[in-house]
Structure formats: C-alpha cells, structure tokens
C-alpha cells in the first residue's frame, strides 16, 4: 500500500471519530506538498468544509492534531494554509519502510532485460597524467554505465589505453636525454606526472631546436622536420615497431610508472573497468580485419600498396585503413578493438565516450563495420561530448597548460576542509571521518560541476 492511501485511511478514520462524517477514501484528495510550503503531503479539505461548518483553520488544526495523536510514528507536524492541511512525515517512517521493503524491491531499478552493453571510457595516454578534460570523460562514462545497470542492462566498463605512437616516444626520448636516470621513486613524483613532465620537456627542447635552425637560415617547415630531437623520436618509433629490445624495455618501464599513477587517480575518482585494452595490442587484430576486408571487397589497395575504403556514396570520402608500408592508423586499431570487445563480451550495444572532435572518425568506424556485415555494427553508439576549456583557451599537455586531475581534486578537498572548519560543526569527528567527509564533498562537487553541463556543450 502506498503512503497516500495510508494517509487517506487515517483521515477517513479521524473524520468519522471527530465529526461522525463518513467519506470514502477514494473521494479524498492527497497531493505532494508544494515546495514553498512546509510538509510532505497535503490534504485538500474543500470537499467537506461546508458540511462540517467549520473554518478551514479550525478544521485543519483539529484534523492535524488528531492525526499526530493517533499516528505519532508517522506524522511529526502539521500546518494549515487556506483549506490545505500540510502534513510532515517522520524520517523514521521512511527508514522503516526501506528496511522492510528494500530486500524485495530495489527502488529506482528495473529488472534484467537480457541486453548487454559495454561502455568504453577514459582512454588515457601513457605520456601524460589524467587532467580535467579526462575527468569529464570518466564521470560521463561511469555515470552512464551505472544508469544502464540500474535500468536492467548487463553493463561492462572498458578502457582503451593509448600506449603507442609518436607522442609516447616523445616522453621516452626526453627521459633518455635529460633524466640522468631519475625515476618517480628517486624524485618523489607520482609516476604519471613524472612521465608527463618529460613530454613537456620534449616540447620545450623541440621548440628551442627549431628556433636555432631557423636562426641558422633554415625554413620553419624544414626546421620542424630536421630538429634532432624530432628525428630521434621518429627513429625510436621505428625501433619500437621493429621490436628493438632496449626501446621496448624503456617503453615498458615508463608505461609501468604511468599505470601506477593512473591506478591511484582511478581509485580516488571511483572509475573502474572490467577490462583494459591497449593500442599496442589492438592494431594486430585490426590488421587482420583489414586483410579479411580486402578479400571480401570491402577495402581496396592502391598502386603504392596502401589500403582504403571508398565512402563517397555515403557522403564521406575515401578513408585510409593501412599505410603503404603496412603500418596501422587509428581506424585500424579501432576496427581491431571493436572486434576484440565483441569476441570477449558478445555485446548488444557498444557505447564510446569520446570527445566531439572524433565525430567524423566514429561515423567512419560504424560505416566500415556495417559494410563488413559485423553483427555488432548497428549497436555502435558514440556518446559525443564537448571539450573542457580554460578561460585562456584549450588545454595543451605538451605545453603544460592543463589542470591535472590530482591537483584539482587536492584543491577541491582543501576548499571543502576550509569551508567546513569555518562552520565549526565537525569538532567531534575523528581524523579518518574528516578525511572521508572532505573527499566526499570535494568529489561530489567536482562531479556535479562537470555532469550538470549537457555533454554536447563545451
């Protein structure tokens, strides 16, 4: 029985006891109290005021007093405004109601619908720490996954780590040249921040070398190609792709530092994943996908050996899926990843939480999968969201103009601490309770700040 029906029964009984006035429960009107008034539920008394020949205030007072006297475990207060009796329900009533009913009825949740959804989010790069923009992605992905779970879907959370490519090699070569063997442990620096500092260091040194070459008479375009640190980075990428042992060893070591840092941040913000995928692995099934597509005619090979798909009839253009030297591009890796995720989980829908700068890329991915007659193609959904920008403009990791997630959380915790201590209401809290309180306030505020904005908006 709902509480509204219970209240109607109590009111009908009171009217009978006080005034010998019979009324059917279905003839009584009980509404939720308007937010501007005190109370939870409101009895509309106009239907019997005239018959009882009492003023609205007197009638409300008498009925309210009787309801509180007869049902002290349910009602705690009442007030009357013109013909409306507002009743306040005891917190203890709701607690008792939940304790009795929650085991059988999980409120706010739907029963299982036999649909499986995988939500891919976070997508960090192993050359820099998680920043404010990543937080929007993490909070969106985690929240969508939880909402789907409560809506009856079997929900899997996954993450693709961008752990290969020229940008990763930039941090690696800068560490080689400038670190003198320093480590996160020797410097007391969180691993992802440590590696990210060398990504910034690369950019600083690269700009310096380009300026020196230009001053020596070289054009800007040529100087950007010929800068020694850039040429060294490109060679390192080739060495990585060829499996050169010392490069692979350095890559694993620096990525390990980053993963240790990521784990700390993920635990702090509440992000979790059923499976982590890595670009250094997904490009292999991606190449296999392209090979199969060549055989079925989905893709075609140009004279230089590069592999493409023609999407002009779909209003797009030709899209490269494999370079002439046989190396993969981003779409190759994503094709391999989509296939791997389906083989792992046999999903009905796959949601990608990716910024709107990849709208075209995601459209191409879905089209290729559909043309390849993949059973999971129609279930691909791009949850596109706008970037997070600073008042000064877009954040750029290579220039160090980002708001690191860890720094932002620490600042929010400090604000929560200072504001709470100003109010002076936590003097009886233990140190552990205070830490939990400040973390809860800080992360709740940060999540609200980012989630309240429509994902499509910056």
Image (cartoon, grey):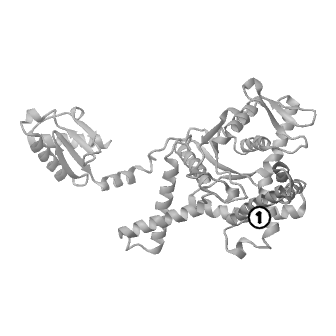
Residue 353 can be seen in this image:
no
Q: Position of residue 446 (x, y in %)?
A: 51, 56
Q: Is residue 94 left or right of residue 173?
A: left
Residue 176, placed above or below residue 168: below
Quarter where residue 42 is shown: top left
Q: Position of residue 201 (x, y in %)?
A: 74, 63
* Quadrant placement of the N terminus: top left
Q: What residue do we see at 87% from left, 56% from top?
A: 231
Q: What residue do we see at 83% from left, 44% from top?
A: 328
Q: Is residue 99 left or right of residue 214?
A: left
How many marks can you see? Answer: 1
Q: What residue do we see at 51% from left, 53% from top?
A: 447
Q: 40 or 445: nearer the eye? A: 445
Residue extending farthest bottom: 186
Q: Position of residue 405 (x, y in %)?
A: 59, 59
Residue 354 can be seen in this image:
yes
Quarter where residue 356 is shown: top right
Residue extending farthest top: 313
* Residue tagged 1: 254
Q: 406 or 153: nearer the eye? A: 406
**Circle 1: element type:** helix
Mark 1 Cα within 10 Å, few/some/many (few <14, many 20+)?
Answer: many
* Quadrant placement of the C terminus: top right
Q: Position of residue 163 (x, y in %)?
A: 76, 55
């Amino acid at each position: 029985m709902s509480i509204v029906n219970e209240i109607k029964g109590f009111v009908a009984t009171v009217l009978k006891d006080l005034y010998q006035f019979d009324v059917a429960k279905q003839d009584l009107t009980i509404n939720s109290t308007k937010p501007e008034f005190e109370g939870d539920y409101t009895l509309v008394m106009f239907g019997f005021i005239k018959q009882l020949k009492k003023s609205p205030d007197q009638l409300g007072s008498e009925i309210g007093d009787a309801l509180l006297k007869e049902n002290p475990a349910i009602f705690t207060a009442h007030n009357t405004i013109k013909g409306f009796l507002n009743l306040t329900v005891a917190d203890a009533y709701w607690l008792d109601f939940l304790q009795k009913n929650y085991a059988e009825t999980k409120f706010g949740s739907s029963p299982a619908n036999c649909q499986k959804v995988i939500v891919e989010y976070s997508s960090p790069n192993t050359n820099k720490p998680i920043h404010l923009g990543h937080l929007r992605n993490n909070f969106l992905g985690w929240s969508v996954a939880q909402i789907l779970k409560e809506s009856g879907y079997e929900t899997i959370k996954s993450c693709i780590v961008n752990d290969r490519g020229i940008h990763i090699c930039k941090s690696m070569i800068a560490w080689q040249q400038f670190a003198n063997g320093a480590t996160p442990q020797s410097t007391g620096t969180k691993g992802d921040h440590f590696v990210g500092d060398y990504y910034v260091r690369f950019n600083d040194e690269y700009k310096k070398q380009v300026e020196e070459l230009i001053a020596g008479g070289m054009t800007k375009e040529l100087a950007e190609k010929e800068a020694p640190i850039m040429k060294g980075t490109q060679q390192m990428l080739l060495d990585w792709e060829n499996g050169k042992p010392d490069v692979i060893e350095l890559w694993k070591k620096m990525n390990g530092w980053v993963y240790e840092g990521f784990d700390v941040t993920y635990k702090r913000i509440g992000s979790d994943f059923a499976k982590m995928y890595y670009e250094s692995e997904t490009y292999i099934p991606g190449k296999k996908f392209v090979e199969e597509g060549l055989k079925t005619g989905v893709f075609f090979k140009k004279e230089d050996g590069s592999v493409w798909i023609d999407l002009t009839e779909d209003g797009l253009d030709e899209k490269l899926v494999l370079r002439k030297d046989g190396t993969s591009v981003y779409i190759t890796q994503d094709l391999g990843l989509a296939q791997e995720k389906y083989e792992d989980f046999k999903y009905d829908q796959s949601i990608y939480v990716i910024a709107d700068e990849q709208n075209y890329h995601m459209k191409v991915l879905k089209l290729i999968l559909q043309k390849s007659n993949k059973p999971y193609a129609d279930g691909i959904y791009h949850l596109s969201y706008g970037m997070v920008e600073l008042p000064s403009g877009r954040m750029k990791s290579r220039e160090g103009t980002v708001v690191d997630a860890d720094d932002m959380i620490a600042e929010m915790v400090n604000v929560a601490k200072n504001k709470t201590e100003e109010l002076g209401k936590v003097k009886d809290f233990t140190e552990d309770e205070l830490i939990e309180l400040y973390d809860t306030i800080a992360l709740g505020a940060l999540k609200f700040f980012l989630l309240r904005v429509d994902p499509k908006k910056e």
